Image (cartoon, rainbow, N blue to C red):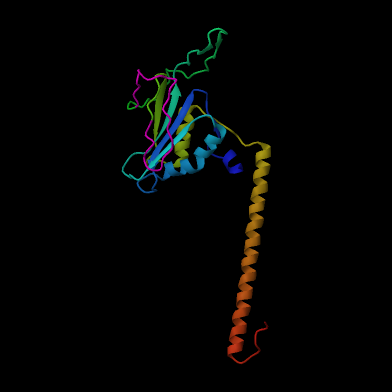
Amino acid sequence: MFNVRCGPGAAKLPPYITKIHMDFCASLLGGHQGARVFWRENLPRLKYHNPQIPMLVNRHDENSKDSALSIFMRTTPTPPVTVDASSNITVTPSASTDASSSTTVDPSATVDASSSPIKEKLFYSSRHNMCPLPSPAPNERVVQIKMKDVHSTEILKRFIDESGAKEIKSTDMDNKEKTYFEELARQRAMSLEAVKRRKATKAKERAFLRQARKAGGPKEAA
């Protein structure tokens, strides 16, 4: 759990981020290694600190295709929704991002004005290219980060810059926990090495006794 809670990718996303979509080839060939590393190492930490945000992953076997990380951002406040007309209870809209941001919006992500912002089609991550990029709602825009032939650290840097996420620094307790687990790993490695040495010594002893029996020496004790 420590490795998921702390490290590169541990960041809190702003409230105007509505969902994240990744699209890349499952193979390491063709420049998709950075995207794969980001998915394996950074995305779980983002999901841990932002469980309310859908993070969809679409993997496929087409090396020639580009890989992209799409960030969905709310551009306008969500209008108040009346729950009960007789009680006058409404939902207060949350803060939204500035629509005048200089970030480039993906032109291929078109908005269907006839779609309802309340009813949203459900998507699920897929290993077989069955989770396409969702269409943004009327009050959303999509920012895409190209990941092909890009190192995972650079992908993370661009994601932090574009999304406005705030990186979560390790606390003193986290550092102590890290030291504790590192010491456990060191002791485990030492124990495994000691077991290997004992096994190697016993194997040499058995080999010596077998050679002695063949030469007519003392037999190995049962």
- Magenta part mainly helix, strand or loop? loop
Is 10 included in the stretch rendered in magenta?
A: no
Specify whether 58 is left or right of 54: left
Q: Within the image, what quadrant is residue 25 found in? A: top left
Residue sitting farthest toward the left: 64
Compared with 189, 10 (above or below) is above
Query: As rendered, which of 143 and 175 lies closer to the eye?
Result: 143
Q: Which residues are magenta?
A: 109-133
> What number of labels is visible?
0
Residue 102 visible? The answer is no
Q: Within the image, what quadrant is residue 127 found in? A: top left
Q: Quadrant of the C terminus?
A: bottom right
Q: Quadrant of the N terminus?
A: top right
Residue 25 visible? The answer is yes
Residue sitting farthest toward the front: 86
Percent position of residue 122, x then y: 43, 30
Compared with 12, 202 (above or below) is below
Residue sitting farthest toward the bottom: 216
Compared with 100, 24 (above or below) is below
Percent position of residue 165, x then y: 52, 29
Residue under the point 56% across and 36% down: 48
Residue under the point 63% across and 62% down: 192
Query: As rendered, which of 130 and 23 lies closer to the eye?
Result: 130
Residue under the point 64% across and 50% down: 182
Residue under the point 58% across and 43% down: 3
Is 131 included in the stretch rendered in magenta?
A: yes
